[in-house]
Image: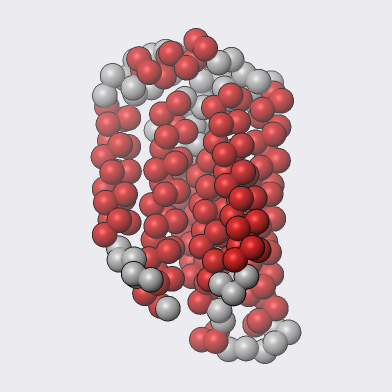
Amino acid sequence: MKKRGYGKTILLFIISIIYTVLVTFVDKQTIGPEGTSVGFSAINKVFLDLISYNPMWDKITDLMLMIAILTAVYFAATRFIQLVKEKRPLAEIDKDILIMGFLYVILVIMYVLFDKVPFNYRPVLLPDEVELEASFPSTHVLMICTIMGSAIAAWRERFYDDENLVTVLKVFACAVMFIGVVGRVLAGVHWFSDICAGLLFSATLISAYEATLDKMG
């Protein structure tokens, strides 16, 4: 199998940065609640007019996020068992788990960063909120896709001798990602551009994870 380099990752990272800059400055209009402005306002307003807040889809996407978090816990628990129960040194930890630990750290840093530095505010004030929350990128999409996408690569590495199991796990992960992304659009709690940003950033992180796995293989 041809090993992946970091070319794709670098390209995705550059596209993500350019996209962020464009969303920040291009076609920015005050179409949000409480006079908040948003970039790509024309396309975002189309979705805003078509889709209103849907609490059912909001809860469904929360469930998909919980499944993704439990998947991350599974990998974290695997690493903990190797460190403590099996008394294996850090250098002998399975590389897919070790690299995933760094990936999760980056994911948490991005989550905190985008929460503290809001590029966009949500297009709706939710019933239990007193002020608008940051919306760019959709952190549900970012976390669900990054965790489940990297899990596919890890499962492929871990269960390489059982193609049927890998296929089942891949279908499961893809279903969680699909429902999470589509559901987040239908929930009406993000601008469409924020959903796209979540996909771009997660694709960059997944590509970096896969390339690093290959490099250490």
Color style of the picture: secondary structure
Which residue occupies the foreground of this view, 157 or 70?
A: 157
Q: As drawn, which residue projects farthest toward the front?
A: 164
Q: Is residue 84 visible?
A: yes
Q: Residue at (38%, 71%) from the top-left corner?
A: 1
Numbered disc total: 0
| Residue 159 x, y percent position in the rendering | 60, 71
Which residue occupies the foreground of this view, 85 or 217?
A: 217
Q: Is residue 168 above or below residue 186?
A: below
Side of 76 relative to 91 (left or right): right
Q: As drawn, which residue projects farthest toward the top?
A: 49
Side of 176 relative to 47 (left or right): right
Q: Residue at (27%, 27%) from the top-left corner?
A: 25
Q: Residue at (42%, 49%) from the top-left corner?
A: 203
Q: Is residue 99 above or below residue 128?
A: below
| Residue 4 x, y percent position in the rendering | 34, 66
Q: Is residue 76 above or below residue 117?
A: below
**Quadrant assignment, res 55:** top right
Q: Quadrant of the C terminus?
A: bottom left
**Quadrant assignment, res 165:** bottom right
Q: Residue at (56%, 60%) from the top-left corner?
A: 151
| Residue 146 x, y percent position in the rendering | 51, 52
| Residue 18 x, y percent position in the rendering | 26, 40
Q: Is residue 72 visible?
A: no
Which residue occupies the foreground of this view, 80 or 8?
A: 8
Q: Is residue 43 above or below residue 136?
A: above
